[in-house]
Image (cartoon, rainbow, N blue to C red):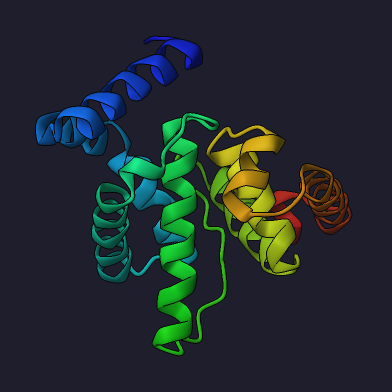
């Protein structure tokens, strides 16, 4: 698999082709490259509501196509796209007055053993105890492997604030899970 810098260059070249030549096949390739992670991000934000997340993903990609001329390459294309997806989610939540809170679910990479499943459940519970901003920052940093600066871009907040949210969230998780053992979980 190509490294992060190579992936960013490929995305930037595809975005340039899509913008400059109205190349829909280049944009389709960008969609193909990013749709899995965008949908995963939106499924977490919608508490696992796959239908809503897929609708939001479709809207996010439509918005990205319409706003492609605004992509300047200051952030990686994926980061720019995650921000559009996040803003699409926020707008949908406001518009429809959905009572959805950002929830971080474990991504399913758990082994089938019961200890791992218990830890996954307890981690989900601990994540629910975090402030929304802390939860969002942790998910974007650790599950989507974004840098603090990229998370700041997605969340439209200063990088220092992101670092604070990550540090506080991690500290709260450490406290919540400090006494964790498979026997205590359930």
User: Residue visible at 64% across and 54% down?
Assistant: 156
User: Residue visible at 32% across and 43% down?
Assistant: 68
Q: Nearer the viewer, residue 9 or 55?
A: 9
User: Residue visible at 47% across and 29% down?
Assistant: 73
182 up-or-down from 78: above or below: below
Tell me: 94 left or right of 12.
Answer: right
Tell me: 12 left or right of 79.
Answer: left
42 up-or-down from 10: above or below: below
Measuring from the top left, give residue 123's x and y in whole percent. Answer: 66, 55
Tell me: 100 left or right of 29.
Answer: right
133 up-or-down from 7: above or below: below
Residue 11 appears in view? yes
Residue 46 appears in view? no
Q: Check the picture and name the quadrant holding the N terminus.
A: top left
Measuring from the top left, give residue 67's x and y in whole percent. Answer: 33, 50
Tell me: 41 left or right of 181.
Answer: left
Measuring from the top left, give residue 119's x and y in whole percent. Answer: 64, 50
Measuring from the top left, give residue 99's x and y in whole percent. Answer: 50, 86
Q: Check the picture and name the quadrant holding the C terminus.
A: bottom right
Tell how many labels. 0
Q: Nearer the viewer, residue 148 or 174?
A: 148
Looking at the rendering, which quadrant does residue 49 occupy?
bottom left
């Amino acid at each position: 698999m190509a490294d992060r810098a190579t992936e960013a260059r490929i995305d930037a070249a595809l975005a340039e082709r899509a913008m400059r030549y109205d190349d829909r096949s280049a944009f389709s390739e960008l969609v193909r490259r990013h749709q899995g992670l965008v949908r995963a991000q939106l499924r977490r934000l919608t508490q696992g509501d796959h239908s809503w997340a897929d609708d939001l993903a479709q809207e996010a990609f439509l918005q990205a196509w319409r706003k492609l001329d605004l992509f300047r390459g200051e952030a990686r294309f994926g980061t720019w796209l995650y921000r559009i997806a996040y803003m699409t989610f926020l707008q949908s939540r406001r518009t429809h007055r959905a009572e959805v809170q950002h929830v971080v679910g474990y991504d399913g990479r758990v082994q089938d053993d019961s200890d791992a499943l218990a830890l996954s459940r307890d981690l989900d519970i601990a994540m629910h105890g975090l402030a929304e901003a802390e939860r969002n920052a942790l998910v974007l940093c650790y599950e989507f492997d974004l840098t603090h600066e990229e998370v700041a871009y997605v969340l439209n907040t200063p990088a220092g604030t992101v670092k604070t949210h990550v540090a506080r969230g991690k500290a709260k998780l450490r406290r919540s899970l400090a006494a964790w053992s498979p026997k205590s979980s359930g």
